[in-house]
Image (cartoon, rainbow, N blue to C red):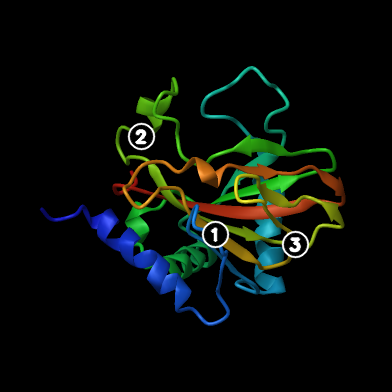
């Protein structure tokens, strides 16, 4: 049986990422995760920060859990028809080997001191109340690509508790991981916590890919 188009690309994604100069694979058997410093330069990061500042709004949750302080950041959907955003999207697609049509619009996030996103996974819980609404058309989330846009004065790290890995925000640093196991099931080892910013601001952009074409 032929694999779906996304699965064919996803199987090649890790090998493609591992071949990128400067790319580091996080040494764990629990999930596929890679880190690349200086993916974006300071000017590119500054331009993205300006976009986030212009259009930010309170972040939301797919499946509210009753904790009003679970996600306290602000969010911005980047304008996907602007030339610089198209160029960024094409660059992420070239890096991953995943066709752009499988990607959600790029999202920006902004964190003030005290703001965080408590431990969560990026995939949608199959048992969640909103699973069908979010996954009916494009399917489940698969790979996550996140880029830190600034070096935070204090706090703001991303902690992957299951694998005991904490990643510090640095300007232009890319972190990416596969939200699925090799059998295609959701991987709970991707649980991660966007920890509280203690001083300054934190900006990131996130690109999620899906099993089927978006939109």
Measured from the top left, where is residue 156 in percent x and y?
Answer: 77, 50
Measured from the top left, where is residue 160 in percent x and y?
Answer: 63, 48
Work out which residue is located at the far bottom of the displayed protein and give it: 21
Please report contact status of discs 1 and 3: CB closer than 8 Å, yes or no.
Answer: no
Q: Residue at x 72, y 65 (%)?
A: 46
Image: 179 above or below 63: below
Q: Callout 1 environment at 10 Å: few (<14), some (14 to 19), or many (20+)?
A: few
Q: Residue at x 39, y 49 (%)?
A: 181
Residue 94 visible to the viewer: no
* Quadrant showing the C terminus: top left
Q: Callout 2 environment at 10 Å: few (<14), some (14 to 19), or many (20+)?
A: some
Query: Cα distance, mark 1 to mark 2?
Result: 29 Å
Measured from the top left, where is residue 37 in percent x and y?
Answer: 64, 72
Secondary structure at numbered mark 3: loop
Q: Which mark is residue 135?
A: 2
Q: Nearer the viewer, mark 1 or mark 3?
A: 1
Provide the residue designation for mark 1: 28
Query: Cα distance, mark 2 to mark 3?
Result: 32 Å
Secondary structure at numbered mark 1: loop
Query: Cα distance, mark 1 to mark 3?
Result: 27 Å
Q: Quadrant of residue 94?
A: bottom left
Residue 157 visible to the viewer: yes
Q: Nearer the viewer, residue 60 or 153?
A: 153
Image: 58 above or below 141: above
Q: Residue at x 60, y 54 (%)?
A: 205
Tag 2 or tag 1, which sits nearer the N-term? 1
Tag 3 or tag 2, which sits nearer the N-term? 2
Apparent side of residue 215 relative to residue 148 in the rendered image (left or right): left
Give the mark count: 3
Provide the residue designation for mark 3: 150
Tag 3 or tag 1, which sits nearer the N-term? 1
């Amino acid at each position: 049986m032929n694999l779906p188009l996304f699965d064919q690309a996803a199987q090649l994604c890790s090998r493609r990422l591992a071949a990128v100069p400067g790319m580091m694979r996080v040494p764990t058997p629990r999930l596929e995760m890679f880190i690349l410093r200086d993916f974006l330069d300071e000017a590119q990061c500054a331009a993205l920060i300006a976009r986030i500042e212009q259009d930010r709004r309170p972040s939301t949750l797919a499946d509210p859990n009753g904790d009003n302080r679970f996600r306290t950041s602000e969010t911005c959907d980047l304008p996907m028809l602007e030339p610089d955003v198209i160029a960024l999207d094409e660059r992420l697609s070239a890096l991953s080997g995943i066709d752009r049509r499988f990607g959600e619009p790029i999202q920006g996030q902004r964190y003030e001191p005290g703001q965080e996103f408590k431990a969560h996974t990026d995939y949608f819980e199959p048992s969640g109340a909103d699973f069908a609404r979010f996954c009916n058309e494009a399917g489940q989330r698969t790979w996550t690509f996140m880029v830190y846009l600034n070096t935070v004065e204090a706090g703001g790290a991303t902690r992957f508790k299951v694998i005991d890995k904490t990643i510090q925000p640095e300007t232009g640093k890319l972190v990416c991981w596969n939200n699925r196991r090799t059998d295609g099931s959701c991987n709970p080892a991707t649980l991660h916590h966007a920890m509280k910013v203690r001083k300054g601001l934190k900006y990131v952009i996130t690109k999620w890919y899906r099993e089927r074409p978006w939109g």
